[in-house]
Amino acid sequence: MERVGSQRQKKSTKAGQLQPWATCPPISTRYVSGGRKLHTRGSAKIAHFGDAPIPVTPSGCLHAITSPVLSLAILLDMHTYAETGLVDALVPELRNRANTAILNIGSSGSVSVETALEAAGCDFVADHLDIDPRQTGYARIRNTYAQSAEAMTDVASERYDACFSNFVWEHIKDVRAATLEAFRVTKPSGVFAFTVPNPWAPEFLFARTIPVALRSRIKKAEVWPTFYAYESVAKLRALCASSGFKSIQVRMFPAVYAYTYRFPVVSLVGNGYDALLRALSLHALMGHALVVCRK
């Protein structure tokens, strides 16, 4: 990863490739527009929509966003840089193809990824799978399966052009079974992309000491028990390879500011810590991982 202030790499637009690492200059000016809090990070605008800071314009900031349309769509419901990276990885797989099929594993009723994909010009139908499915009126959803990721018994093999999961694998006890199922339902040459926490990042080592009920009160949102059965991002990558995926790419993202931005003083510390990790390329300490597997 390049250091702050150096020339950013040009992003790749080839299908199946993630954008290369880039870095952000530090936050500078803060202002308010249309009732929404924004500030600038160098030439990039950052907005707080709902739950977390997301870049408004594609400036190569941490993870390059594919297009201005996509970046605006992400503002609707995306929470972290890893989630924007998830969308960025899926767009080349789906755009310019008609009526592709995707599966959201562990959706819990969220359509934030699907909304961003649609805004980026992707044509698809989506199925949702969750042990506790939540109904949504999103028009592109075709089927909703009330099943676990470890046993997708109602889902046909090789059915989806792309499968994805957004911070779900840490809640699964049998991650090998779930990964094998993701491989089974993905079409040949299709992708399975998913985000997970890095269990060895300091913030998640600390989070393990906090009871689930207290974490829910702090986040002001529903929180599920975490098992981190994959043990580490490196072991998770090896698991994906042993499950049959031919190509596995991993990208790491700092995550502390996404959890501390609500608290004025702590957020400054969180943002500074994230900037330090980026500047020193301390990937092993970064809190979020994006894993993209090709079948």
Image (cartoon, rainbow, N blue to C red):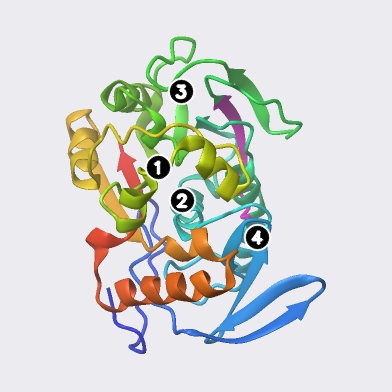
Q: Which residue is mark 1?
A: 193
In the image as oriented, which residue stretches furthest toward the top? Answer: 153
Helix, strand or loop for disc 2: helix
In the image as oriented, which residue stretches furthest toward the right? Answer: 34
Q: Which residue is mark 4?
A: 75
Q: Which residue is mark 3?
A: 159
Q: Dot 4, crowdedness within 10 Å: few (<14), some or many (≥20)?
A: many
Q: Tell which tag, 4 or 3, sits nearer the viewer.
A: 4
Numbered range of the magenta stretch: 120-128
Position of 284 relative to 192 (above/below): below
Q: Dot 1, crowdedness within 10 Å: few (<14), some or many (≥20)?
A: many
Mark sitting on residue 86: 2
**In front: 238, or 39?**
39
The earlier-in-sequence mark between 3 and 1 is 3
The earlier-in-sequence mark between 2 and 1 is 2
Q: Dot 2, crowdedness within 10 Å: few (<14), some or many (≥20)?
A: many
Q: Tell which tag, 2 or 3, sits nearer the viewer.
A: 2
Specify whether 237 is left or right of 55.
Answer: left
Q: Residue at image x 59%, y 37%?
A: 222
